[in-house]
Amino acid sequence: GENVEQHPSTLSVQEGDSAVIKCTYSDSASNYFPWYKQELGKRPQLIIDIRSNVGEKKDQRIAVTLNKTAKHFSLHITETQPEDSAVYFCAATLPSSKAAGNKLTFGGGTRVLVKP
Amino acid sequence: GAGVSQSPSNKVTEKGKDVELRCDPISGHTALYWYRQRLGQGLEFLIYFQGNSAPDKSGLPSDRFSAERTGESVSTLTIQRTQQEDSAVYLCASSLGQGLQPQHFGDGTRLSIL
């Protein structure tokens, strides 16, 4: 099955700096890669996703890049703000034809702390 | 409803008891997923329902775990003879269906086994 590794496990940045989180996946057939933000005690919130036919996607201060050859994808947050502090999870899923539905395989999470 | 709704939000029970967790998906979402999140860890897939197809149970950790879904609505996750290692947050998600559809999560049920 799919395996997703996420690094770093914790990340502390100064407000205004950039934060980068990296994930690798094992199954080259994976074709959908969402990122979730989870604040303490709250539900995971989808913040951005990317499909395997795209190399990069941006949404305001957030961007995701995908390298299919190397089987890794990254989340970039620019101009970080204190409200960006949370745990971020990457995930990957295989095509429906290979696995029933789109069950997500998650990375272990990155705890991001933005210091004012 | 506006989002995925789960109940109860918290459940404390004694080891050996059975528990039942409920999930109401977003209206119109045919796909429903259950995940488990242990403290400080990522989410682990448990089970998936899509319409009237047979569920994908490949993530259920033991035969003490089971889940049902009535049509394309409410789902219940049942854990029999609970053990302390079952303590976790159980999260439900729904999506529009198969294909590359984003999954939207509920707030989860925090289960504590004494």
Image: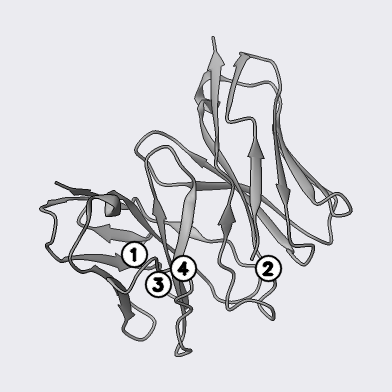
Labels 2 and 1 positioned on one and the same chain: no
Question: Disc number at residue A94?
Answer: 2
Q: Find disc 1 in the rendering and name its residue.
A: B1
The amino acid at mark 2 is Leu
Q: Nearer the viewer, mark 1 or mark 4?
A: 4
Q: CA distance from mark 3 to mark 4?
A: 25 Å
Q: CA distance from mark 1 to mark 3?
A: 6 Å
Q: Would residue B91 appear left or right of A95 to someone viewing this image?
A: left
Q: Chain of mark 4?
A: B
Q: Is residue B99 above or below residue A64?
A: below
Residue A39: image quadrant is top left
At 85% from the left and 50% from the top, the residue drawn is A55
The amino acid at mark 1 is Gly
Q: Is residue A35 above or below residue B91?
A: above
Q: Find disc 3 in the rendering and name its residue.
A: B27
Q: Residues within 10 Å of mark 4 (few under 14, many from 20)?
A: some
The amino acid at mark 4 is Gly
Q: Is residue B84 above or below residue A112?
A: below
Q: Nearer the viewer, mark 2 or mark 4?
A: 4
Q: CA distance from mark 2 to mark 3?
A: 25 Å
Mark 1 or mark 3, earlier in chain: 1
Q: Nearer the viewer, mark 3 or mark 4?
A: 4
Q: CA distance from mark 2 to mark 1?
A: 29 Å
Q: Residues within 10 Å of mark 2 (few under 14, many from 20)?
A: many
Labels 2 and 4 positioned on one and the same chain: no
Q: CA distance from mark 2 to mark 4?
A: 15 Å
Residue A25 appears in the rendering = yes
